[in-house]
Image (cartoon, helix red, strand yellow):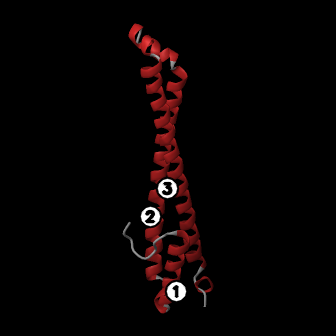
Amino acid sequence: MPWRDIVTDDTGTMLKSLIEKKEKKEKMKWRHTLSVILTLILLGSLIARIFIYQQEILKENPFDILSKNYLLLMAAIIAFLFQNYYYTKKKKAKDKFDRLRDEVIDHLNYTWYINMQPKIKEQISSYMQENHDINVVYKSK
């Protein structure tokens, strides 16, 4: 008998929500990584442009460097702000996922039908591990 037919709606809803939170966490992680790469590329190109291609301006009037590279500097600042924004979103998504994962583990450990038929918990945990790479057996991270 498959575990989906036996578990209650709240267990199914919790597992579905856990999968959605994991996907959101992965999406925020990916966006944060892209924004970090973009920030590094823009800052690297700004430094390269200043110290390789504009050495004469740097020697004459160092303050002209900012006016000549205004757009690149603003793009790097905006990319840095996006990096901070996505870092915060990634951290919040991870915290929400971890809290719900702990709640699901507690729910699976103390649900009456799981105690009556322990194979259901094994089926649920193997499904979550194999299909979604989510550990619902132990609370360790």
Q: What residue sits 52% from the left and 62% below the top?
A: 22
In the picture as drawn, the residue positioned furthest to the top comes out as 60
Q: Nearer the viewer, mark 1 or mark 2?
A: 1
Instruction: Tell me the residue that label 1 is attached to.
Output: 120
Amino acid type at mark 2: Arg
Q: What residue sits 46% from the left and 57% below the top?
A: 94
Quadrant that contains the N terminus: bottom right
Amino acid type at mark 1: Ile
Quadrant that contains the C terminus: bottom left
Q: Secondary structure at mark 2?
A: helix
Query: Which of the two labelled residues, at mark 1 and mark 2, occupies the earlier sequence position?
Result: 2
The x, y position of residue 23, in whole percent, is: 56, 60
- Depth check: give the residue in front, 39 or 138: 39
Amino acid type at mark 3: Ala
The x, y position of residue 117, in whole percent, is: 50, 91
The Cα–Cα distance between marks 2 and 3, rounded to whole angstroms, is 10 Å
Q: Residues within 10 Å of mark 2 (few under 14, many from 20)?
A: few
Mark number, residue 112: none
Up/down of 100 relative to 111, above or below: above
In the picture as drawn, the residue positioned furthest to the left comes out as 140
Query: Which of the two labelled residues, at mark 3 and mark 1, occupies the earlier sequence position?
Result: 3
Up/down of 101 relative to 109, above or below: above
Instruction: Tell me the residue that label 3 is attached to.
Output: 93
The x, y position of residue 76, in whole percent, is: 50, 31
Q: Quadrant of residue 58?
A: top left
Q: Nearer the viewer, mark 2 or mark 3?
A: 3
